[in-house]
Image: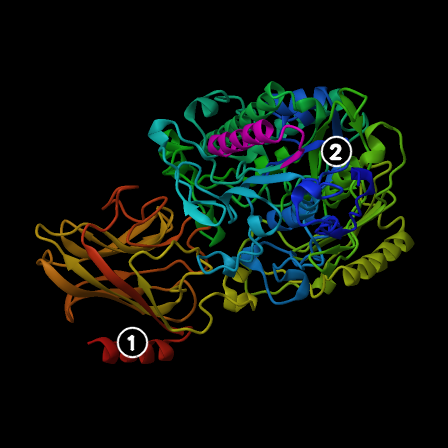
Amino acid sequence: MGDADIPRERLPIPDAVVPTATSLDVHEQDPPFEPVQPVRPPRGAPNVVVVLLDDMGFGAPSTFGGPCRMPTADRLAAGGLRYSRFHVTAICSPTRQALLTGRNHHSVGMGVTTEMASSAPGYNGIRPRSAATLAQVLRGNGYNTAAFGKWHQTPARDVSAAGPFDRWPTGEGFEKFYGFLCAEMNHWYPVLFDGTTPVEPSRRPEDGYHLSEDLVDHAIDWVRDQRSLKPDNPFFVYLPFGATHAPYHVPREYRERYRGKFDHGWDAQREITLRRQKELGVVPQDAELAPWADGVPHWDELSETEQRSAAALMELYAGFAEHTDDQVGRLVDALEELDALEDTLFIYILGDNGASAEGGLGGTLNEHRFASGIPDSPEFILDNLDALGDATTHAHYPVGWALAMNTPYQWTKQVASHFGGTRDGMVVHWPRGIEERAGIRQQFHHVIDIVPTVLEAAGIPQPSEVDGIAQKPIEGTSMLYSFNAADAPDRHRLQYFEMVGNRGIYHDGWMAVTRHGTPWEMVQGEQRRYFDDDEWELYDTTVDWTQARDVSAEHPGRLNELKQLFLVEAAKYNVFPLDDRMTERENPREAGRLDLMGERRAVTFHAGAKRLTEETAPNVKNRSHTITAEVEIPDGGAEGVLVAQGGRFGGWSVYFHEGRFCYAYNYFGLEVHTARAREPLAPGTHEVRMDFAYDGGGVGKGGTATLHVDGKQVGEVVVPRTIPYYFAFDETFDIGCDRASPVTDDYPVVDNRFTGTLRWVRVDLGDDLCDDVGTERERSRFKAAHD
């Protein structure tokens, strides 16, 4: 049976029927048996590479007129196509789930990020098996498949050694995975997975290590092996970087390339970028700058100190962006050296949402700190100027730069109603399949269009069944029609948008939108905002490319039609009920989702327990809790960590320092409160315990940590305030060491393992406490249980 005759609608493709034996003797077998042939893709199917950058707006890369030099994107665009009306979902996990399934993000359970999932069908964070991934389909048709980088699609409660692993990358069609599963990552000291096995880099920053470089090293090695062993077999490489999401971690020389380049400020940068965009032809000559966001200062309204601080953070971001693009360039070079680039459909998506405003109006050195409502002063940022980009910072630029990086559109990441949150540049390069060079395509498209485009290019049908599960239709529209027809009319004519209550509906050039929230207001106030109070705007994008002029007053009938159409589409794709909670939803109980610990109040870990994410670790926030361990102290004393959660930018640790039992609470990198035993522990076996009595009265309140050795109190510290919602996305809960960044400088970044013998660690959790009466009751219960 030839490739063209293989039935591909049901995956896996059934085994070929083989003839039965006709003889006892193999020499008399007629006809002779033929070797079993592996499944092959259709003849002419190209290699596929999809590169996805994080948190980059339309107006950031040089390829679309921005100030961040992106030579690789420029090179691929010069040999291929720029798509100037390509859209994503306004935040990371939803874009990734839509990208790999070809379905709208609510259709596949990813209405928000995995850490914000709830129990509602459109928001539960669980991809239905009726929506197979692109990797599953390509692998089922004979492709080799690999993913390197940020995943952020696995249900948060599944990211542990207990699994299940069916929604990890290797369970979703990728034969090889090397990267991380959470929202962001420390690029100097990452915590990674190879398949489902936790791994850490063998090199350190002082040896030249950087995560983006590491990811591309692994991608190149994999492609080279694949080409050596199966040169006639096409491959699919998915390369979603952690960059350019915060933290902005980049070698210093890249930051230095931009020194002074942003002193003119964000208002001037918008004008410069729009002029370049018109020169490139990625926006029309009559395109206008969309309105500036209310409440965001213009550059000339800043003090000199604020300007210096803001410019430094933008220099850092631009260096981060260029460094990332350089790594993509190494992959492109490797494909060219392997004579594979000509027949590779290379899709380079320059952002999974618009530029991020999550650093606040002034920027921050710790985005988690800002997300809990604690801004950094410009003086504080400038005091740490030399450290920007290194492992001691977790930087994010100010809102003004996010707006500039989304030029010429308005608003930012999270805001699905406006193009600043949803329109990103995309480059498609496929010399064998695209005739034009340096072309521009202005058809309206969406990230759900990637899957049908790849399948059509490969000659593979959309499957009706995968692993025995009937498949829901792919909701995207193939872009292949536009590859060699610049003026072809749009085929993706209708698209809804929604993110945390921000909503929009596009239909044949008209777009009705309503912005519900402000993206840099991460914690909701006491005053609830009702969806019925949201004001709708109307734009005719056939004459107003940038959503600069609201024409709702002139066309009330059209606006009403589109509002009704949004309701139809939202009901169809599981958008309801709308949910506008942000930081609060990171707490599983607040969000209404299951977590791994469930209702358990105690869990015991053995000394070799694997690292846990915050979603799978015991939740010690906003409650009393106890950490107990049995240790054996050798002659000469012990050093190192028994158990730690979080790191330099927020967390806690129970450890030994100078032979003494200690506890440290790191409040967002601003304060570290430490309790220490008065004397070193003598050699032998001991039970050590830290009791934390939470003050109660709400979230983020303080408490008292008390240290005990063999039942005797040996130390105490008052912690005035605690982290209410999330310690860190890029840190872990660790037994016997503290991975990634350290909670305290009492021990080093690495090589901080406990030097004695750790028998076990137990975590006991009290009630969630929101009132003082409960706090006193809990203190009494803990005292009775442990004293």
How far across and how far down the image is residue 6, in percent?
79, 44
* Magenta highlight on residue 226: yes
Can you give x and y, in whole percent of width and height, for residue 503 in the image? 73, 54
Residue carrying label 2: 45
Of residues 382 and 681, which is closer to you in this image?
681
Q: Is residue 188 left or right of residue 511?
A: left
Gap in angstroms between the C-alphas marked 1 and 2: 66 Å
Determine the image quadrant of residue 33: top right
- Left or right: 56 in relation to 431: left
Q: Residue at x 54, y 61 (%)?
A: 585
Is 437 positioned to the left or the right of 664 in the image?
right
Q: Position of residue 274 (x, y in %)?
A: 71, 27
Seen from the viewer's position, the closer of residues 767 and 388 is: 767
Element at label 2 = loop
Residue 578 appears anywhere in the view: yes
Locate the N terminus by quadrant.
top right
Q: Is the magenta stretch mostly helix, strand or loop?
A: helix
User: Which dot marks residue 547?
Assistant: none
The mark closer to the camera, 1 or 2, is 2
For the magenta stretch, what is the residue range?
212-236
User: Measuring 26% from the left and 46% from the top, which residue is drawn there?
Assistant: 752
Query: Looking at the picture, how far across and down is residue 67, in whole percent?
Result: 60, 25
Work out which quarter of the rendered image holds the C terminus and state it.
bottom left
Q: Mark 1 points at which residue?
A: 779
Q: Residue flagged by tag 1: what amino acid is it?
A: Arg
- Choose the circle earlier in sequence order: 1 or 2: 2
Q: Residues within 10 Å of mark 2 (few under 14, many from 20)?
A: many
588 versus 271 height, above or below: below
Q: Is mark 1 on a helix, strand or loop?
A: helix
* Location of residue 403 with respect to 601 vertically, above or below: above
